Image: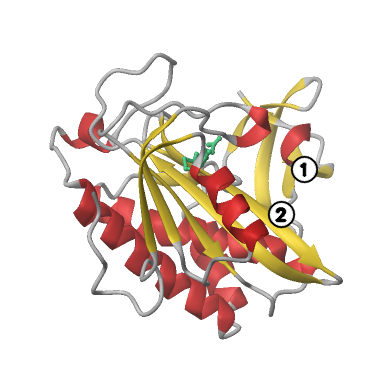
């Protein structure tokens, strides 16, 4: 059970604690559909039976050992072509807390969190609704592997696995919400460039030659991210190409 948060301005003041649900993102979507929600509502689940990840993957987290939660925002000041700015603000908000725990944690485009060996310790699933040219609602679903030590998949790790320490989930949730709220308010106040700079400064493989697959394996160097979040990569022949999430794999 998570307590009412004292250190945020609006985030998590409405806190829905669920012992079990299919997916906190799906729960948030049904709250939005019913109209019964306020901006900053946080839904936390001890167990998700149908946790969802990116690329239609599922998200598995051992009960009671990890953080699985979703936040409902109403970023109706954001234009649709600024959608990735929200992504960057959220990713950097999470990263700041993770880096305080271990400085070598990085963001993998678009919104995974990796340790120094490339193992994944968390990810985000952001689901938006649009009204005209503006955002209406955004559900920011976050899964962080915290105290779990064994995983059914390869290349997964937790904060406990990286540091050898056990973390208090309530404490960590509060740290995350405080940091996410700070970035969200910066975004709302128009600090788009500084958010982008923070994100880019912590991006895994930024400016480094590495292996990718866009249908064919190739060596490329990440140059940056465009407004819709497309990843810009230079190939060894000097050609620069932009990719959306489904078009490229890191290998
Ligand atoms: C990914 O890396 O593929 C994204 C994982 C996102 C998982 C979180 S857990 C809380 C929220 N509810 C879900 O069903 N998914 C997100």
> Which residue is disc 1 drawn over?
244
Residue 169 vs residue 214, the one in the foreground: 169
Lateral position of residue 232 relative to residue 68, left or right = right
Residue 49 rendering spot, x and y as whole percentages: 46, 27
Which quadrant of the figure has residue 195? bottom right
Question: Looking at the image, is 84 positioned above or below residue 61?
Answer: below
**SS at circle 2:** loop
Lateral position of residue 101 relative to residue 212, left or right = left
Dot 1, crowdedness within 10 Å: few (<14), some or many (≥20)? some
Mark 2 and mark 1: Cα distance apart in space: 7 Å
**Snapshot colouring:** secondary structure
> Which residue is disc 2 drawn over?
229
Q: Residue at x 50, y 72 (%)?
A: 184
Task: Report whether residue 166 is seen.
Answer: yes
Lateral position of residue 109 relative to residue 148, left or right = right
Lateral position of residue 127 relative to residue 101, left or right = right
Q: Residue at x 63, y 66 (%)?
A: 35
Which quadrant of the figure has residue 241? top right
Total numbered labels placed on residues in the image: 2
Q: Earlier in the sequence, mark 2 or mark 1?
A: 2
**SS at circle 1:** loop
Dot 2, crowdedness within 10 Å: few (<14), some or many (≥20)? many
Residue 182 rendering spot, x and y as whole percentages: 41, 74
Q: Which residue is drawn at 69% across and 80% down?
A: 77
Q: In which quarter of the image is the C terminus?
A: top right
Residue 168 rendering spot, x and y as whole percentages: 16, 47
Q: Are marks 2 and 1 in contact (CB under 8 Å)?
A: yes
Residue 5 rendering spot, x and y as whole percentages: 26, 68
Which quadrant of the figure has residue 211? top right
């Amino acid at each position: 059970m998570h307590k009412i948060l004292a250190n945020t301005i609006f985030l998590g003041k409405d806190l829905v604690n669920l012992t079990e649900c299919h997916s906190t993102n799906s729960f948030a979507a049904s709250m939005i559909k019913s109209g019964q929600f306020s901006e900053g509502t946080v839904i936390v689940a001890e167990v998700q039976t149908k946790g969802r990840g990116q690329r239609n993957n599922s998200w598995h987290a051992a009960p009671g050992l990890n953080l699985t939660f979703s936040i409902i925002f109403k970023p109706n000041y954001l234009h649709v072509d600024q959608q990735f700015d929200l992504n960057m603000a959220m990713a950097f908000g999470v990263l700041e807390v993770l880096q305080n725990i271990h400085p070598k944690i990085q963001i993998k485009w678009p919104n995974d969190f990796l340790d120094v060996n490339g193992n994944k310790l968390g990810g985000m699933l952001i689901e938006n609704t649009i009204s005209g040219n503006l955002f209406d609602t955004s559900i920011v679903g976050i899964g962080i592997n915290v105290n779990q030590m064994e995983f059914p998949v390869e290349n997964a790790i937790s904060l406990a696995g990286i540091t050898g320490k056990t973390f208090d989930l309530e404490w960590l949730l509060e740290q995350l919400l405080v940091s996410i709220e700070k970035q969200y308010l910066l975004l709302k106040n128009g600090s788009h460039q500084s958010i982008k700079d923070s994100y880019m400064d912590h991006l895994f493989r930024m400016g480094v030659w590495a292996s990718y697959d866009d249908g064919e394996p190739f060596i490329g160097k990440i140059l940056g991210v465009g407004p819709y979040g497309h990843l810009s990569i230079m190939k060894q022949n000097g050609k620069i190409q932009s990719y959306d999430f489904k078009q490229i794999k890191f290998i």
